[in-house]
Image (cartoon, coloured by chain):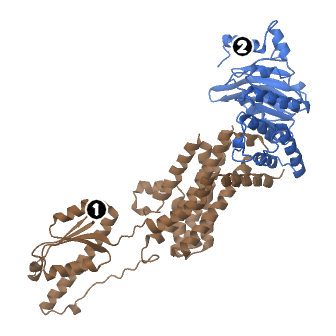
Amino acid sequence: MDVHDHPTTAERDPGAALFVRGLVKTFGSFTAVAGIDVDVPRGQVFGFLGPNGSGKTTTIRMLTGSIAPTAGEAFVLGEDVIRHPERVRARIGYMSQKFSLFEDLTVAENLRFYAQIHGLGRDEFAERRAWILHMAGLQGREDELARNLSVGWRQRLSLGTATIHSPELIFLDEPTSGVDPVARRQFWELLYELAEQGITLFVTTHYMDEATHCNRLAFVYGGKLIAQGTPTELRDSFGPGATLEDVFVGLEEQSRLRGDDR
Amino acid sequence: MNPLDRIGAVVSKEFRHLWRDPRAIAIVLLMPVVQLLLFAYAISFDVSHLPTIVVDADRTPASREYLRDYVGSPLFEIVEYADSPGAVEQAFLRNTAEVGVIVPAGFGRTLAGGGQAKVGVLIDGSEPNSARVAQAYTNALNLLATQQVAIAWADTQGVDVTGLGQLEPRVRTWYNPERRSAIFLIPGLIVVILAIVTVQQTAVSLVRERELGTAEQLTVSPLRRGELMLGKLLPWTLLAFIDLVVITALAVWVFGVPFRGDPGVLAAGAALFVFCCLGIGLVISAVAPSLDVANIAALLLTFLPAFLLSGFVFALNQIPVALQWFSMVFPARYMITVTRGVFLKGAGWGELWPELAALGIYAVVALAAASLLFSRRTR
């Protein structure tokens, strides 16, 4: 539960999905991420929670190697993502809240492009494509332009393009924002399906009902990690009958009083 | 994991984007043809058949003979014969005439008496180009008329002027003897079109990916930044060359523009120029915060300099010195020297190497700046 009761660098588990210590990112005088430690074992659904502007996206961008941190270390699937981001890229997937689809390309063309970028062979692509179309319920709509799909379909297609290369770890940055509750529930069912295959999921969200779907949670506020644990642990620490919503609001309040917000 | 496969994936994706966007196709394929027709037929700096109003207040054989020179010249077209000088102003205001010739009463008598007969020529200066040409024409015409008057007078005095020493300049215009503006404009137009096609599209294409979020998706993928850039540049390089070939063919076979030089020099120049433009486009897309900004920046940085600061329309040595220096910042001026040199003058490597070198340096600097700006974004 406490942020600091973690193994030191020497105790790093080489098989862990994520091992992050003292991660800092500053943009000029603005500190977006102020020293974050995270451990994620393989096969977990890890919820990374926090209000808008708390540093969630910046953290993900550092963990996927698209920006370099100001300080700290980060190992993704056992590889040092800061020094060798290219070693990690083929093994991770990334889905942003923008969905990252080419709107003037069809469903099939979007899948094919991402498959080519990841160097999938013909047979492998055919197999992945069939699985994704089934998973997203997009069979028969292969030739529709991504632009013409409704939000729920685009979200699932986006998850498909992010998983086309069978990654071991998927970062999902607010994947359900702007999606209706029914589609959100369907989406989480897909995430469970992926988790059952042994894929590690690192999900950011600000929907508390989604947090209960996670094996483990971390709360960020003002660029700092203010609590970490399983949903049950976090609820219990706040007294009987507390919901995650209560926990989050309470933690946020405490942090604000301590002056943690920048 | 083959880099070529990944670049190929980007190239085919770019062509798909183009194929789905009718406006982009129109810009790439139709605009060059439309511009070519516009500049070759509609827009012309050739001045002839200047509408002219004539006021003959003298009405003598001498005045009629003088005015006959105007009637006979293809440069002037008499649109009106009037009696009072006031008619000239009326015609200027109504835009029916640009030149007014006024022969005052007593013209014939003064001339016959050996005096200096005065003729009034009024020129509508609201359109400076035709005004300048009209002035030159009337000066020349009056000089000839004066000469004839002098010869006629000498004749009546019994003087033989054939023994008189005279000076006759033999002026010949090279490369474009008829001084057709189409021949002057089309080689420059090629440069303008290449600039528009390449800069605009590259500037916009990466910004669009950033707005869609696909740019970030790609940075997380195994696709390297250099591969993405190359994949985006190759289709436009290819399209630029298609445009180059189409315009050159139309210019030579339809509009009779001579092609006197080495096609290799033109191709080399065009390749370097396209790289310059793609570099500029990439710099814009690295810096521009939105699609609109990228569009406007592309317009300001290529269209206007290519038109105004390249020698395309206004000769570079005729513009203010500060602007001459400023024009060196844009690659179009070097490329226009190359196209005019190759098309009209038959220039080759020996004459055009300084421009080719300038383009080469420019391309390296622009592409280096672009890749620097892109890597800075991710720091």
Please identify which colour was used for chain B in the image.
brown
Q: Secondary structure at mark 1?
A: loop
The answer to whether residue A82 shows anywhere in this view is: no
For the C terminus of chain B, give its image quadrant. Answer: top right
The location of residue B320, given as percent across then percent down, is 39, 57
Query: Which chain is assigned blue?
Result: A
Where is residue B321? Give x, y as percent.
Answer: 41, 57
Give how far across and how far down residue B25 sits, in percent: 62, 57
Task: Residue under label 1, please give it.
Answer: B95
Assess disc 2: are there few (<14), some (14-19) or many (≥20) residues with their C-alpha within 10 Å of its C-alpha: few
Quick check: B218 above or below A71?
A: below
Return the chain for callout 1.
B
Q: How many marks?
A: 2
Q: Which residue is mark 2?
A: A249
Q: Amino acid at mark 1?
A: Asn
**Horizontal placement of B51 versus B268: left or right?**
left
